[in-house]
């Protein structure tokens, strides 16, 4: 099985700067997306710090460890890397007044022979399209999600909530952060979408799934998603990562290599 990737960002229709950031290290199956927050350009600084740090540090570790690392090893490396990035952003926010209070969401994916190790912090999301079934595979760390879980709001009421963008967890706002981390099976034909809320707030899940289904080319799908969000107002920056699994499932006696042929 092989994986195809595509990443894109767009400033949207309402903002002058872009506080979203994406990074990809395709040879090791690493994809990172961040949506920054904070005054001045602090959100942009936080998101770029996070994606650059993770790509450099975790990417190097994944390259050195190869496929010999266990799922437990990779999970530990992801936790350590996010913790170190969190401290770097937190320290920058507390030593430079212009960056005070800055932070960022995170969606972090490591595609391995065992599946997708998916970590996230905040309300940026990951989805999976399998056949015609499109589903969210992360759960927002937000006040709105907590209200939904507690039954204080219905999904219909949540659409109009004033708490839509209040996150309960973010990278860099405190001296420690908890990365929520799960392992997801990858099947041939699966398409994964990571995105900032500049996409998911503008388009409902059904619309996101339909756009992916109707555009088999990842670059075309990415452009259709961005255009769709902008057509609905583009009230925020838009960032996305697309990853598609292609090929056969593993055969008896042989594993599969997710990034093309072995060296």
Image (cartoon, helix red, strand yellow):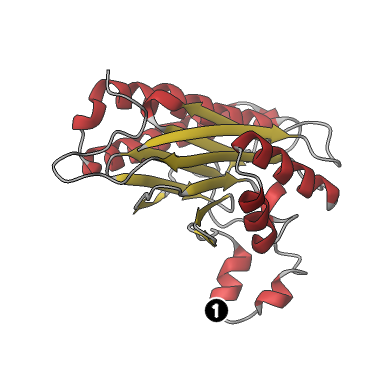
Q: Would you say 47 lies left or right of 9 here?
A: left
How busy is the neighbourhood of tag 1: few (under 14 within 10 Å), some, or many (20 plus)? few
Q: Quadrant of residue 33?
A: top right
Q: Secondary structure at mark 1?
A: loop
* Residue receiving disc 1: 150
Q: Quadrant of residue 255?
A: top left
Whether residue 32 is visible to the viewer of this picture, yes or no, is yes
Q: Would you say 226 lies left or right of 53 here?
A: right
Q: Residue at x 78, y 43 (%)?
A: 227
107 shown above or below 21? below
Q: Residue furthest left?
A: 253
202 shown above or below 97? below
Q: Position of residue 46 (x, y in %)?
A: 60, 32
Q: Residue at x 77, y 48 (%)?
A: 229
Q: Would you say 25 lies left or right of 9 here?
A: left
Q: Nearer the viewer, residue 234 or 36?
A: 234
Q: Position of residue 132 (x, y in %)?
A: 54, 61
Q: Nearer the viewer, residue 96 or 211?
A: 211
């Amino acid at each position: 099985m092989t994986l195809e990737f595509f990443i894109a960002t767009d400033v949207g229709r309402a903002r002058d700067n872009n506080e979203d950031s994406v990074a990809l290290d395709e040879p090791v199956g690493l994809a990172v997306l961040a949506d920054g927050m904070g005054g001045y350009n602090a959100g942009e600084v936080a998101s770029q710090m996070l994606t650059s740090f993770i790509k450099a540090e975790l990417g190097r570790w994944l390259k050195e460890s190869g496929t010999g690392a266990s799922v437990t090893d990779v999970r530990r490396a992801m936790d350590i890397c996010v913790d170190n990035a969190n401290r770097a952003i937190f320290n920058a926010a507390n030593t430079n007044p212009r960056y005070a209070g800055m932070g960022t969401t995170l969606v972090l994916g490591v595609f391995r022979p065992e599946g997708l190790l998916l970590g996230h912090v905040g309300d940026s999301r990951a989805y999976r399209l399998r056949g015609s079934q499109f589903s969210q595979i992360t759960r927002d760390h937000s006040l709105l999600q907590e209200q939904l879980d507690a039954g204080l709001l219905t999904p219909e009421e949540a659409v109009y909530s004033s708490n839509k963008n209040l996150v309960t967890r973010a990278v860099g706002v405190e001296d420690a952060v908890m990365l929520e981390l799960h392992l997801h099976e990858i099947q041939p034909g699966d398409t994964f979408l990571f995105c900032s809320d500049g996409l998911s707030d503008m388009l409902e899940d059904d619309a996101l799934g339909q756009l992916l289904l109707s555009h088999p080319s990842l670059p075309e799908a990415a452009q259709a998603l961005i255009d769709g969000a902008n057509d609905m107002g583009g009230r925020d920056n838009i960032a996305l990562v697309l990853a598609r699994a292609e090929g056969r499932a593993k055969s008896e006696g042989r594993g599969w290599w997710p990034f093309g042929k072995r060296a």
